[in-house]
Amino acid sequence: MKKTVITFALLSSALCSAAGADKMPDPYSQAKPAVMARQGVHRLMGATLMDAGAIASGQKKWNGFTLLNRVDALEQISQMYNDFFFVPGSFADSNTRDDLLQRKTEFQELSADLKLAAFSLRMAARNHESDVAMQAFGTTVQACNACHRSFMKPGTEVILPLPPTPAGH
């Protein structure tokens, strides 16, 4: 009897969850939810990178484990950003150039550069190589900026600054 009650409870819970899931907007196929998801992910990606840079440059206390967490998050977040990027109709009211969707290959190449730079930063943090991490951070920022220069409309570029390297670090 207990098994039957538990089974029915789990089944009804699953069905209710499935019914609720149908009402949720799909950011992978609907323009407005994709834009909202992409904007949130992009802000998080920038904040994560700036935090990693502050740690790598010595503006925040060096902590390889914390930096490693930031870089892991950056890599995962950048992948999510790519997933939301090419949803049809999601760039109608954005600051991106009008030919973005026709330049998908270029975006994916620049995205691959970002992932490689983030991986280099991750490995430097993992190996506790602060100087190498700072160089890799600069490469990561340059990869972000290359995409912004290529795909943002003139006058709306969001170029990330490189933090100054403290003396002796």
Image (cartoon, rainbow, N blue to C red):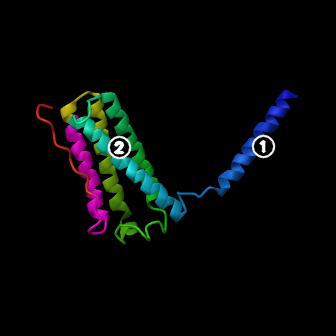
In the picture shown, does residue 61 fall above or below 95? above
Neighbour tally class for label 1: few under 14, some 14-19, many 20 plus, Cα within 10 Å = few
Q: Quadrant of the N terminus?
A: top right
Q: Which mark is residue 12?
A: 1
From the image, give the main secondary structure of the stretch colored magenta.
Answer: helix
- Give the residue at mark 2: 48
Give residue 71's quadrant in the image: top left
At 27% from the left and 35% from the top, the residue drawn is: 55
> Is 141 contained in the magenta span?
yes
What amino acid is labelled 2 in the image?
Thr
Side of 110 relative to 77 (left or right): left
Give residue 4's quadrant in the image: top right
**Number of numbered discs overlaid on the protein picture:** 2
At 26% from the left and 30% from the top, the residue drawn is: 61
Q: Quadrant of the C terminus?
A: top left
Residue contact at pointers 2 and 1, CB within 8 angstroms: no
At 76% from the left and 37% from the top, the residue drawn is: 10
Give how far across and how far down residue 68 sits, in percent. Answer: 34, 33
